[in-house]
Image (cartoon, rainbow, N blue to C red):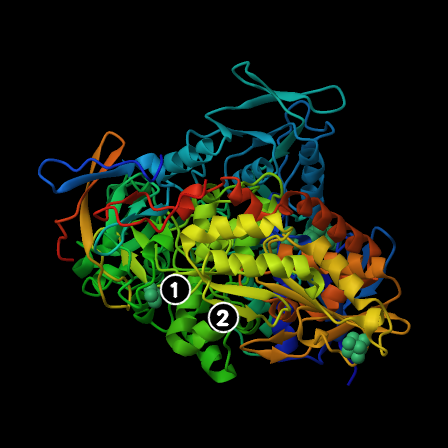
Amino acid sequence: MARERLVIVGNGMAPGRMLEHLFELAPERYDVTIFNAEPRVNYDRIMLSPVLSGEKAFKDIVIHDDAWYEDNGVTLHRGAKVEKIDRDAKTVTSANGITAEYDRLVIATGSAPFIIPVPGHQLDGVLAYRDLDDVEKMHGYAATGGSAVVIGGGLLGLEAAAGLHMKGMKVTVIHLMPTLMERQLDTAAGYLLQKELQGRGIDIRCGANTKQILGDDKVTGIELEDGTVIDADVVVMAVGIRPNTGLAREAGLEVNRGIVCDAQLRTSDPAISSVGECVEVDGRVYGLVAPLYTMAKILAADLAGAPIDNYVHSETPTKLKVTGVNLYSVGDFAEGEDREEVVMRDAARGTYKRVIIKDDRVIGAVLYGDVADGGWYNELLRKGEDVRDIRETLIFGQAFQNAGNSDPLAAVANLADDAEICGCNGICKGAITGAIKDKGLSTLDEVRAHTKASASCGSCTGLVESLMALTLGDDFDASAPKSMCGCTHLGHGEVRRLIKANGLKSIPAVMQELEWTTSGGCAKCRPALNYYLLSDWPGEYVDDNQSRFINERVHANIQKDGTYSVIPRMWGGMTNSDELRAIADVVDKFQIPTVHVTGGQRIDLLGVKKEDLPGVWADLNKAGMVSGHAYGKSLRTVKTCVGTNWCRMGTQDSTGLGVALEKFLWGSWTPHKVKLAVSGCPRNCAEATCKDIGVVCVDSGYELHYAGAAGLHIQGTKKLTTLETEEEVMEVTAAMMQMYREQGYYLERIYKWADRVGHDTIREQILDNKETRRAYYERFVFSQRFAQTDPWSERVSGKDKHEFKPMADLSSPHAPSQMEPAE
Amino acid sequence: MNAATPFTRLADAEWVRVGTIDDIPRQGARCVKTDGPTIAVFRTEDDRIFAMQDNCPHRQGPLSQGIVHGNCVTCPLHNWVLSLETGLAQGADEGSVPTYAVRLEGRTIHLNLQNSPAA
Ligand SMILES: Cc1cc2nc3c(=O)[nH]c(=O)nc-3n(C[C@H](O)[C@H](O)[C@H](O)COP(=O)(O)OP(=O)(O)OC[C@H]3O[C@@H](n4cnc5c(N)ncnc54)[C@H](O)[C@@H]3O)c2cc1C
Ligand code: SF4
Ligand code: FES
């Protein structure tokens, strides 16, 4: 049977979702052609704000990649704006001359930002905020620093302002109304929001009207009605949107505010349907995705010839996607004779809750600061439930209703199966738990992929995770991307990304900006944060000793009886009589009970008393020995064999290369310990193929291996490549170290990191792409400038001396002190 | 501050000066040796001082070597978390360490060795 031809004008989120449903219902029915004025695939427009602020990259927000169009046989004309619909011939034609015939046509032109026609609005530097091009232009201005004015203090304007601010611009928001986001927030919440944003350094002027934009051909500033002049290099207008109806109007379709559609989304021409922000249905137009996704479902069913529902209006909750700001608003919150309201404020925590009730039913809610109960109020609203009986305690939230049970999981457990969890995608609890059980899903990404829940704006992620925890029980923890620790809901990856994106340069700054729930973190997150900051801001961040484990704090390994072990470095496993003699003397002098040869080719002195450590180090230093970092999440050893120096099988100078590598890499802090080895031939006496990074010398050069492990977990390495020169080995090894340092999660070994990011990615970035390799290498070299100081000699000369001496000795009667002061 | 400074024993023999707050790093600890068990003296982020025996109730780990966070310290050996205020193990672990009363006079720290309020 010949396929019918479906043509879609516009490639936004609404038709994208519609096609997903359509391909599920009737994959073979249509040949699909899409015209898109934007020169790109379908992406998550909602998430432009994190792209603007630098928290995400464009590739993170692509919804349908090239492969998707290919797999589904969809023809996508990019950068092709449709200019004409010929309803008699049933064709559309684009500005660049492509004509397509249709059996069914879908208009999905979305809406366009409204530009206030004040004098100066055409100047270079006046931008809207709607698509990726706008974001890229804003990045261009932000790159030069300078200042920005955002006109409009609604959702979009504030997200733009926060993003530009995070990019380092000085930002002023001009808002006509007396409080921010007045369409979603009441004055109290608007005030809290204003205070929060001002506290971050964004200047906010409410009740201000723009008179003109100043500048000759480029923007230089704006002038307000009251005569105030504000300098600006860029002006972003975010004052509202208008449905794109021009094309439909010219084709003679019925158009009012939007393209008028019936409840099945057909326009006045039954061969033409419409979906998205350009639609007017039942007198309403929309500006949030949730109702558009409902439309998408209905239209897909209609196109597939499946049974369909009528479109009915429902309220969509609003959230602001500014990192660190929590607000939630839904429904109607105007004051009125026939309404009551319940309000709870907590000035200390900066939270505000208001629920509006009419005829014993919730009709609206505004939450600021603590938004955990937003979903519950929305559910009460949607169902029109009678709340007379819980009126008194309504404001305390859902947990309170369950007899003071404050376990957040219990609150989620108590939600009805049809309670909406993901507002953007209209996914209810039952659909999520059902999918988890039926499809055996165990990670957040899988749940997102299968149900779409939390895949759009992401603000319901916590709820979805709670549902997973409930449904999977103990299995959940094992596989899901976990939060770093009990002090935050963020995982390691998010924290690392946000440290860079927000330019956070101290532990208190991270805890403040990323909303740690404890005042001083814990023993899990503090060492991780200390490492991330050290690795991300070399030379700037000052190591916080108190956030390190004792071993790294005192540069020795604590043993089970509270004594320490000391391991000096032996470069490439080489030593000599002077070193051995010095070690023997130290053992005698400090009566060190145990001497042991380690698996990393060096000598371990065990049972050293803490107060003796500086003395031991001083003597070892004198013989030229330095710390072996055997206690650190850092470079440990480079094990070698004797290679061509002595062995008759040797193919290269494995010892020399090992020593060179160790001298180059030592001192660098890493997410977990890093061990290397260099073997002189494939007989592999140095056991290089179970190391984090291993080199096996061959006649033609050096095989580079990585991602091995031989501890709790045993795993052979993967071979990356064969290199010809020692210089290349050094460069690729350092690049790999640096990539791991920048991306690894704290306590994640190289093999785990490699599995997570993918071996192809690693190969591409440090082998195939010479530029990224060089850049990693150079960043490594730079950070080594601050890392290669011997911690022992620093301490011998007095650093941290409090660590090694008791504060006071009250023992009587002056028993011979075991703690001769070091100096 | 030199560790060998002779320490004044107060007349009532209960409060002993052990040093000053500046001897201990924020979010850190120092030890005080006695005839009996070694005592760990902790300084929190917000400059409160606590003292307790330097032995973890789990396997005697030296708590003074742990990481101090909030009102707690995490033992360096197996990560038990103990409250500095009560000496009680937190979370699922059970056990407690004896604590000692501390008095700050200006920046000087006094310990009461007799007084070991049962935790
Ligand atoms: C920065 C930002 C943040 C947002 N945040 C949220 C949020 O948190 N929550 C929420 O629910 N919603 C949010 N929205 C709104 C949401 O993104 C939109 O409701 C949604 O993207 C609209 O989808 P659509 O498919 O109707 O239109 P669009 O996504 O606008 O797609 C229309 C497409 O059609 C193309 N087009 C137009 N005319 C033609 C033509 N003649 N020929 C060919 N192509 C044409 C356009 O170039 C465009 O690519 C946000 C929007 C922005 C800009
Ligand atoms: S790995 Fe090869 S070169 Fe090195 S010692 Fe063993 S046999 Fe000799
Ligand atoms: S000794 Fe403290 S946790 Fe084991």
Residue A585 lies, with reference to residue A679, above or below; the image says above
Q: Amino acid at mark 2?
A: Ala
Task: Give the left or right position of residue A536, taking residue A772 as reference.
Answer: left
Label 1 near ligand 3 (CB < 8 Å): yes
Residue at x 76% of width, y 74% of height: A719
Task: Name the quadrant containing residue A381.
Answer: bottom left
Q: Is residue A299 visible?
A: yes
Q: Secondary structure at mark 2?
A: loop
Residue at x 74% of width, y 29% of height: A124
Task: Give the left or right position of residue A199, taking residue A70 as reference.
Answer: left
Residue placed most toward the observer, B45 or A169? B45
Report the residue marked by disc 2.
Answer: A480
**The C terminus of chain A - image quarter:** top left
Task: Give the left or right position of residue A465, taking residue A568 as reference.
Answer: left
Q: Position of residue A377 (x, y in %)?
A: 32, 57
- Which residue, as the protein is rendered here, is positioned at the far bottom? A1
Residue A395 lies, with reference to residue A768, above or below; the image says above
Q: Secondary structure at mark 1?
A: loop
Report the residue marked by disc 1.
Answer: B77
Say whether mark 1 and mark 2 are on the same chain: no
Chain of the residue under the numbered disc 1 shown in the image = B
Q: Position of residue A165 (x, y in %)?
A: 57, 35
Q: Residues within 10 Å of mark 2 (few under 14, many from 20)?
A: some
Residue placed most toward the observer, A776 or B13? B13
